[in-house]
Amino acid sequence: MMTNGKAALAYFFGILVAAALTSEARAGDVPQVEVVRVPDGGSYPQAQTDGRGRIHLLYAKGDPARAAVYYVRSDDGGRTFTRPIPVNSVPRSAIIVGTVRGPHLALGRGDRVHVAWMGSDEARPRAVGKATPMLYTRLNDAGDAFEPQRNVISKHPGLDGGGSVAADGGGNVYVAWHAPDGAEGEANRTVWLSRSRDDGKTFEEETAILPEKTGVCGCCGMRAYAGTGGKVFIVYRTATRQVHRDIHMLQSDDYGQSFRVAASDPWNVGTCVMSTAAIAQTSDGVLGAWETTDQVRLATLAPGSNDVKLLTVPGAAKASKHPAVASNRLGQSVVAWAVGTGWNKGGSAAWQVFDDRGRPMSVQSGRREGLPVWSVPAAVALPDGSFRVIF
């Protein structure tokens, strides 16, 4: 017969085992994760799936300081891809050096592909004062070529870290970047947003959107995402007093007219951390990922709520950067990130799957060597619930 202490211990252990089994089995089978290499020897993949489960993928090739960008699509879960279509109409006009810069992809109305990127020193057209442009293009109506690239900066140049693009099913397209608001210096940088109401045909003059003056980490990237019902999310890193380099997730409920801080993650560090961020839609909210204290952090935001859950991704120890996220129809999620990369140095891609309660699934994590210099992993979910990690 067990003593009371042993009985209690056995009971507690049974609860833990049951919880673990429940975590692994909640939404059916454990989701499959397949690793896919970027086709054509490309790097810096950016991917998204549409309502039909097709994977839309961007990648860069050539000189990372003056790169070309290509677009492909896969209709079979990443096993094969269509013929590459050039994205930038001016050769050598993209830059991925630093990893915080590079092309971003968004799917809009009718699954039209929208792309925005920070221009290289050879990019045309230039921004005001012959400054570095924030370039935009979209797939044409026939779906067989991209329109000539355009600069969307009207009055506020000063790119350092790259910008981002978002689009929704109602024809709204948003291009965001950070640049000085008058005076120079990180403390005087702000986030600018240019909006299109006609599927990217025309763009309004940019407006400053920060709800408070926080500055922006100059050589850090950012991420934009547009949901339904007028919701727009933008993640950026602050630079208050040079040492408060906190992540702020901004949320708009009125199609980008006004924003509030929906989530924040403090990090006091006196140097530019050259970080990026990711956002994805979940079955019941938004999922964000970014770097804090040299580790990857995951945030879940429920709709209509200020209840933000933050956790550190297990296995994402020091030297983990540049996350990508995706969520499937079962509420399960995957986070992929870069490990061991640095200035002019490649590394590896790692990933971790979470169940529908946000708990890591121990049987679904991994790491693969061979991440190219200046590259990042991408992650997508397919209709069958499986995930693809692309690098």
Image: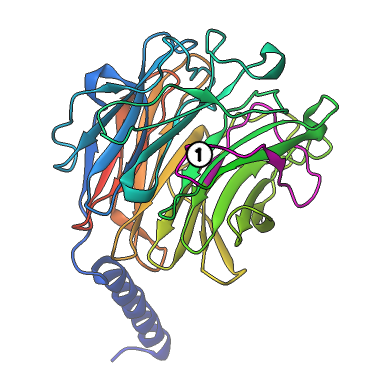
Residue placed at 48% from the left, 45% from the top?
198
- Say what amino acid the circle numbered 1 marks: Val
127 vs 18, left or right, is: right
Q: Is residue 92 left or right of residue 144?
A: right
For this rendering, which residue is in front, 288 or 366? 288
The structure's colour scheme is rainbow
Magenta stretch: includes residue 314: no
Please name whichever residue, 326 or 135, is drawn nearer the observer in this view of the structure: 135
Residue 297 place in picture, x, y as percent: 53, 49
Please tell me in which quadrant of the rendered image residue 63 appears: top left
User: Does 388 sit left or right of 77 as displayed?
Assistant: right
Quadrant containing the N terminus is bottom left
Q: Residue at x 45, y 20 (%)?
A: 374
Q: Position of residue 325 (x, y in %)?
A: 41, 47
Tell me residue 110's x, y (percent). Answer: 32, 49
- Bounds of the magenta span? 198-224
Q: Residues within 10 Å of mark 1 (few under 14, many from 20)?
A: many
Q: Quadrant of the C terminus?
A: top left
Residue at left 58%, top 64%?
Answer: 308
- Residue position marked by numbered label 1 in the rendering: 165
Q: How many marks?
A: 1
94 or 360: nearer the viewer: 94
- Tell me the residue at 46%/16% (across/down): 345
* Residue 390 appears in the figure: no
Looking at the magenta stretch, what is its main secondary structure?
Answer: loop
